Image (tube, rainbow, N blue to C red):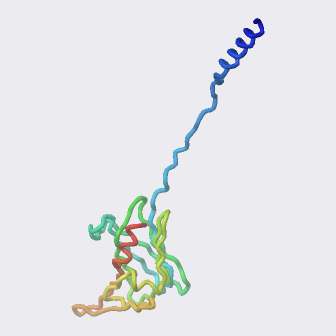
Amino acid sequence: MKRILFLVFLTFLVSCKEDKAPNNKVETRTKITPKQSIFKISLEGVFSKNDYILFFYENEEGKGFDKKNKLIKGFKGSPEKQTVTLTLPEDENFYNFSLHISDKIGQEITIDKLTITDNYDTIEIKKDSLFYYIHPNDYIEMHEDGSFNLITKEKNGKHSYNPIFKAKKKLKNKLKFI
């Protein structure tokens, strides 16, 4: 009988001993914040004369262009290929743009690639596709192979020069998803 009582007592002690010791581990969680969205617009090509690019953008769809939403980027003329990059302010989106590519009469520009990127996605438009994504104004003769000529026009007895590209609907639709 003592043996049975001893076994019951021993079983009772073992079953009560299931309480775990306190866990001294400290759980730390790292807060992961997404990268800030920064749009960059790059033109890769040849720019023959010192000049600048003026980039107007709409940061709200259908709002239109204004002087507040513009970027200016100067560049040195060179017969060598170079990349001119414009960077929008942090967390600024854009849905449409107007790209004024020269202010110098006689400027010769060849664009091999237009790239629009943020921290996550990239739209790359090569020379032979430029015609399908951007629309030139009257100061640009654009050809289907992506080449173009910058031209002056006479208006009111004065030579006028203001070559501008604007996004076509196909590109605007792509910009909504970048």
Horizontal and vertical percent position of residue 134:
38, 81
Q: Which quarter of the rendered picture does the C terminus lie within?
A: bottom left
Q: In this view, does 85 lie to the left or right of 136?
A: right
Residue furthest left as drawn: 156
Location of residue 100 (image quadrant)? bottom left
Location of residue 140 (image quadrant)? bottom left
Q: In this view, does 157 lie to the left or right of 100?
A: left
Q: Which quarter of the rendered picture does the N terminus lie within?
A: top right
Figure disc tally = 0
The residue lying at 49 percent from left, 54 percent from top is: 34
77 versus 13 height, above or below: below
78 versus 20 height, above or below: below
The residue lying at 46 percent from left, 73 percent from top is: 123
The answer to which of 173 and 112 lies nearer the viewer is: 173
The answer to which of 149 and 144 lies nearer the viewer is: 144
The answer to which of 51 and 174 lies nearer the viewer is: 174
Horizontal and vertical percent position of residue 157:
23, 93
Residue furthest front as drawn: 1
Residue furthest right as drawn: 3
The residue lying at 64 percent from left, 22 percent from top is: 19
Q: Is residue 36 left or right of residue 140?
A: right
Location of residue 70 (image quadrant)? bottom left
Horizontal and vertical percent position of residue 119:
49, 63
